[in-house]
Image (cartoon, rainbow, N blue to C red):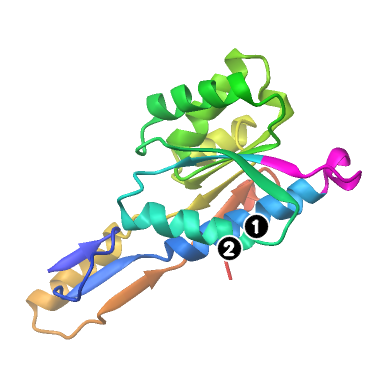
């Protein structure tokens, strides 16, 4: 059995193929830390204010993405002023962002655990006339979704979670042919921003 994308508890599988969600979350956090430090209000001493829109928090990917992000923010002058489980769904993310906007007069950055969530948050902020007050970042980096949002200027960055389809097919054929395959195949990820999008993004270390 090949487990694709979402890691499971235990080791009762032939091979797992996917990226490192904790590393991706941490990279998103490090990007956020750097950009927030550049804000004039933060330079003047105000703590940065972040909204986090979580994936389904009973799932391992959401836990790892959130955990990595929080690790990068630890000890920095940054507060998560609102966090909500948007269950990976854009309409839920939009509704949760509307709630955050209603009670938070200042938001500097929105981190969503996937790009549909980040897009939903952007649309909510746009409807409130506040989209230019904050940065938006998401995870997935699909060509027809997150990368388009970056190109449109809606997202400051998207962090790729590679689909692994090609690797799954190749390794399934190897297994059927009696070959041994690695227990875990960790795929490389990339970050896409307006500055590097045309160059194909930048690989995460």
Residue 180: where, in percent of width, then height?
17, 86
Q: Is residue 21 magenta?
A: no
Residue at the image point whose x is 43% and y is 55% from the top: 161
Q: How far apart are the two marked residues, 1 and 2, measured between alpha carbons?
A: 5 Å
The residue labelled by disc 2 is 71
Question: 130 or 191, which lies in front?
Answer: 130
Quadrant of the image occupied by residue 153: top right
Left or right, 38 with respect to 154, comes to right
For the N terminus, the quadrant is bottom left
**Figure disc tally:** 2
The residue that disc 1 covers is 73
Q: Tell me, yes or no, whether the highlighted magenta stretch contains residue 39.
A: yes
Report the magenta residues as a range.
38-49
Q: Relative to residue 178, is residue 102 depicted above or below?
A: above
Residue 194 place in picture, x, y as percent: 67, 43
Do labels 1 and 2 touch, CB within 8 Å?
yes
Give x and y (percent) for residue 123: 54, 21
Disc 2 on helix, strand or loop?
Answer: helix
Q: Residue at x 57, y 57 (%)?
A: 70
Q: Quadrant of residue 44?
A: top right
Do we see residue 201 in this rendering?
Answer: no
């Amino acid at each position: 059995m090949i487990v694709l994308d979402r890691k499971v508890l235990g080791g009762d599988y032939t091979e797992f193929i996917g990226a490192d969600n904790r590393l991706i979350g941490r990279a998103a956090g490090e990007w956020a830390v750097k950009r927030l430090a550049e804000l004039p209000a933060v330079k003047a001493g105000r703590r940065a204010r972040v909204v986090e829109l979580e994936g389904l928090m009973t799932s391992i990917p959401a836990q790892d993405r959130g955990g990595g992000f929080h690790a990068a923010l630890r000890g920095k002058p940054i507060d998560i002023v609102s966090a909500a489980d948007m269950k990976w769904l854009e309409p839920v993310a939009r509704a949760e962002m509307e709630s955050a906007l209603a009670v938070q007069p200042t938001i500097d950055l929105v981190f969503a655990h996937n790009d549909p969530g980040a897009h939903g948050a952007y649309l909510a902020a746009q409807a409130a006339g506040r989209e230019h007050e904050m940065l938006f970042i998401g995870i997935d980096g699909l060509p027809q979704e997150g990368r388009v949002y970056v190109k449109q200027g809606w997202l400051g960055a998207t962090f790729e979670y590679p689909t692994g389809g090609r690797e799954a097919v190749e390794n399934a054929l190897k297994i059927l042919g009696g070959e041994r395959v690695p227990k875990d195949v960790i795929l490389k990820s990339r970050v896409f921003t307006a500055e590097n999008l045309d160059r194909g993004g930048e690989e995460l270390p």
